[in-house]
Image (tube, rainbow, N blue to C red):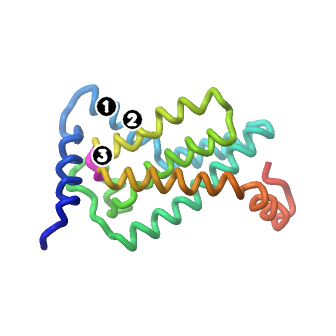
């Protein structure tokens, strides 16, 4: 079956960016950032932040956690509709075994959602850190051979879009959930 020229270009560009098989500092940095967007890491961190934080950080953690959770469901739905196979490779077997589909990148979507939500909620000192971190996570996913360029571009766009919507509706939505549960979320 012949692939579209744009997909061929995507695969070639992604392969050129790959460092998974090349030992050295660049690969070590890519490994770090490829894992820095893991959902379990963020879920655990946000739960700890909710328990230990003041009201600002509790709200921040709840908004991020709910956004990440809803985004994950959307990303998985799209992945199972599109069913694009990940690039061939050995690194990242946990990702390859638990989620064989690559489009869109959940890590890129999550990283950019986190950065956009932080931009909307603050604190201002954290915003530039997350806007540097998010593209590094996305690039690392390509560098480690887990995604194509188009996967991370689509994931980043999806994360930004969902975060922008979420920032407009989170207060009434989470207020309604708090009412159903009978206790405040933050």
Name the residue that disc number 1 marks.
28
Name the residue that disc number 3 marks.
142
Q: Quadrant of residue 82?
A: bottom left
> Residue 177 vs residue 101: left or right?
right
Residue 121 placed where, x, y %? 69, 41
Highlighted range, magenta: 144-148
Question: Rounded to the nearest whole Å, what is the CA distance between mark 1 and mark 3?
Answer: 14 Å
- Helix, strand or loop at mark 2: helix
Question: Rounded to the nearest whole Å, what is the CA distance between mark 2 and mark 3?
Answer: 13 Å
Nearest-to-viewer mark from 2 and 3:
3
**Dot 3 crowding, Cα within 10 Å, few <14, some 14–19, many 20+:** many
Q: Quadrant of residue 79?
A: bottom left
Q: In terms of secondary structure, what is the magenta stretch mainly?
A: loop
Residue 90 placed where, x, y %? 22, 50
The tag on residue 32 is 2
Question: Does the CB distance between marks 2 and 3 fall below 8 Å?
Answer: no
Residue sitting nearer the eye, 112 or 51: 112
Residue sitting nearer the eye, 21 or 113: 113
- Helix, strand or loop at mark 3: helix
Which residue reaches farthest left?
2
- Helix, strand or loop at mark 1: helix
Above-or-below relation of 176 to 105: below
Above-or-below relation of 139 to 105: above
Which of the marked residues, 2 or 3, is nearer the chain's N terminus? 2
């Amino acid at each position: 079956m012949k692939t579209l020229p744009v997909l061929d270009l995507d695969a070639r560009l992604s392969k050129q960016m790959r460092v998974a098989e090349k030992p050295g500092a660049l690969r070590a940095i890519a490994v770090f950032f490829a894992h820095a967007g893991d959902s379990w890491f963020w879920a655990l961190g946000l739960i700890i932040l909710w328990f230990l934080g003041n009201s600002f950080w509790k709200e921040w953690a709840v908004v991020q956690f709910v956004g990440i959770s809803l985004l994950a469901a959307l990303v998985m739905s799209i992945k199972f509709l599109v069913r694009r196979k990940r690039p061939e490779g050995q690194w990242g077997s946990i990702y390859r075994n638990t989620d064989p589909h690559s489009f869109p990148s959940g890590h890129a979507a999550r990283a950019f959602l986190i950065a956009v939500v932080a931009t909307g909620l603050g604190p201002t000192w954290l915003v530039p850190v997350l806007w540097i971190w998010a593209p590094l996570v996305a690039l690392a996913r390509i560098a480690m051979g887990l995604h194509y360029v188009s996967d991370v571009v689509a994931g980043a766009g999806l994360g930004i879009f969902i975060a922008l919507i979420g920032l407009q509706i989170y207060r009434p939505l989470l207020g309604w959930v708090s009412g159903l549960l009978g206790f405040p979320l933050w």
